[in-house]
Image (cartoon, rainbow, N blue to C red):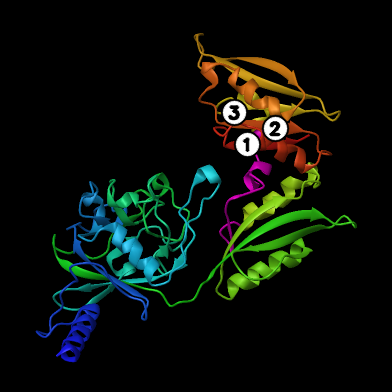
Amino acid sequence: MKAARATAFAAAFALAAAGAFADGGRTPPARVTADKAARTVRFPVEASGAGLDDIVEFAIVGEHSDKMYETVFSTSADPREIAGAIDGIGVPPGEQPDSRDARFWPRGEKLSLHFVHAGTGRKYRLEDVIADTLPEEKPELPGAPLAVRGARAQDGSLEASTNSPCSVFSLFNCPQSSLALPGALLQSSVYGRFKPKAEFAKGEKFEAVLSWDGASRVRRYDATAFVSGGGEIELELVPRGAAGGACRASMDKTLERLRKEAKDGADIYVTPGFAPDFPLSKTRGVAGVFMMLDGLGMKVNGRLRGVSIHAFDPQEAWRERARRPFQPFEIRQAADGSRKFTYVREDWSGEGMEPVLHPEEKPFKEWSELPGLIAGAGKDAEKIDTALFFMSGAAPAGDFISGAAALPERINTVYVFAE
C-alpha cells in the first residue's frame, strides 16, 4: 500500500511540475514549484489586460501591487517564494544596482523565461509579450532576465512581499525585484520605452516558467592600476569569488584578456581603481578608458578602496564655481602638502537669477579633521552630499583615497581634479 501511494504521489508531482493534466488542458500551479534537477521554477500569472498602446514598467508584479496599470502580468504567488525557489535550484545570488555604492549595472546569472497559456498551451517568450520601442539603443529583452537579489528589509525578508510595487520582474532597475533586464536602466530614462506586444484579456491565465542552464557566466574582477618601473601602466586583476590568483600585465594585454572572455560568453564585471602610489596626473586617462569600455564587453561596477573610478573622471567645467549646478564642499591639497577646506555658501536673497557665492575657507592639517569641518558648516550645508578634491598631479592617488575615506558617510559622491 505504501509503495502504491508513493508511486501515485510521484506521478502526481511529475504532472504538476510539467503542468499537464489528464484532461489534456493546462492549469497553472496554485503555488510556486521548483525542480532542482531540471533547474526550473514555475508559478501562476494572470494578464493585466494592458493594451498595445499602454506603457508598462513591469513584466510581473505581486497581486497586491499598486502598479497593475503598468504591468503585463501579475501573480498570486508570494514574491518571497519565487525568490526562494530561484535560490533553491542553485542559481548564484545576484545584485541590483545601487548608486550609493557606484553600482549602476544589475549583476546576475542569465535565466530563460517563457509564459504558457493555460487554455491553449502556447508558449510566449518575453519578447513576444513586451515590445522595446528603442531597440537600436541596446536590445534588452532577448537573453533576459537576470537573477538578481531583490532588496531586503532589516529582518532579511524580501521587500517585494510586503511593499509596493511588489515587483517580481521590473523593466527598469527596481531595487526590490528578483528578476531584472541586463541594462543600466534608470526609471526616468526608460519610461515609455516598453509596451505590450501581445494583448490578452484581463485575468487570462498563464504559467511563468523560469529555467537556468546551470552555467555560471558572471565573472567579477578588481582591477588595480600600477605604474611599472619602466613607466608602463599595468593592471592587476584579482578575481572575486572564484578560483585563481591575481594576474598582472600591461593595460592593453589585460583589457584584451577581458575582451576575449566576454567574447567567449562570460559576463564581465570590473571594479577598477589605483594603487596608492599611482600618480594622480595619470588617473584621468586610465579612468577614461574604463568609462569608454563600460557596457562594451564589460560592466564597470562598485568601489575599490572605497572610491569609484568615476571619481577620477570629473566634468572639467566643475572647476569653475559659476558653472556648477550646485556648490559641493571643496578640499584642496597644495603641492607643499598644506590643506584647505571650503564651504561655498549660496546667497539667494538678491534679485538676480543666480546666487551670490560666499566662500568660507578653513585650513587644516589632518584628514581626520574633515568630519568636524563639514559639521561646522552649519544647517544650510546638511544637504550637501558631494565633495571636490583639488590636488597636485604629482601627488599619489593614495592621498585622495585617504581623504575620501575620512569623509562622513553622507558624502557619498567625490571627485578629484589633478592640478
**Pointer 2 with pointer 1, Cβ within 8 A:** yes
* Helix, strand or loop for disc 1: strand
Q: Please state, as top left, top right, bottom left or bottom right, where the C terminus lies in the image.
A: top right
Q: How crowded is mark 2: few (under 14 residues within 10 Å), some or many (20 or more)?
A: many
Query: What residue range appears in magenta?
Result: 294-317
Q: What residue type is labelled 3?
A: Arg
Q: What residue appears at the point 63 percent right and 26 percent down from the top-left corner?
A: 371
For residue 389, which numbered disc appears in the image?
A: 2
Query: Of helix, strand and loop, which one carries label 3?
Result: loop
Q: Is residue 241 visible?
A: yes
Q: In this view, does 311 lie to the left or right of 393?
A: left
Question: Which image quarter holds the N terminus?
Answer: bottom left
Q: Residue at x 37, y 69 (%)?
A: 88
171 with respect to 251 (left or right): left
Residue at the (71%, 40%) spot, across then down: 401
> Which marked residue is nearer to the observer: mark 2 or mark 3?
2
Q: Which of 46 and 418 is in front in this view?
A: 46
Q: Measuring from the top left, give residue 208's x and y in whole percent.
A: 26, 69
Mark 1 residue type: Val
**Do the numbered discs 1 and 3 sit on residues whose CB atoms are within 8 Å?**
no
46 vs 389, left or right, is left
Question: From the viewer's perspective, is 332 left or right of 217?
Answer: right
Q: Can residue 60 be seen in this view?
A: no
Mark number, residue 324 = 3
If you read the primary sequence from the N terminus, does the residue marked by circle 1 or circle 3 appear first? 3
Residue at the spot of label 1? 414
For the residues marked 2 and 3, what is the alpha-carbon distance in whole angstroms?
Answer: 15 Å
Tell me the residue at 75%/21% (across/down).
364
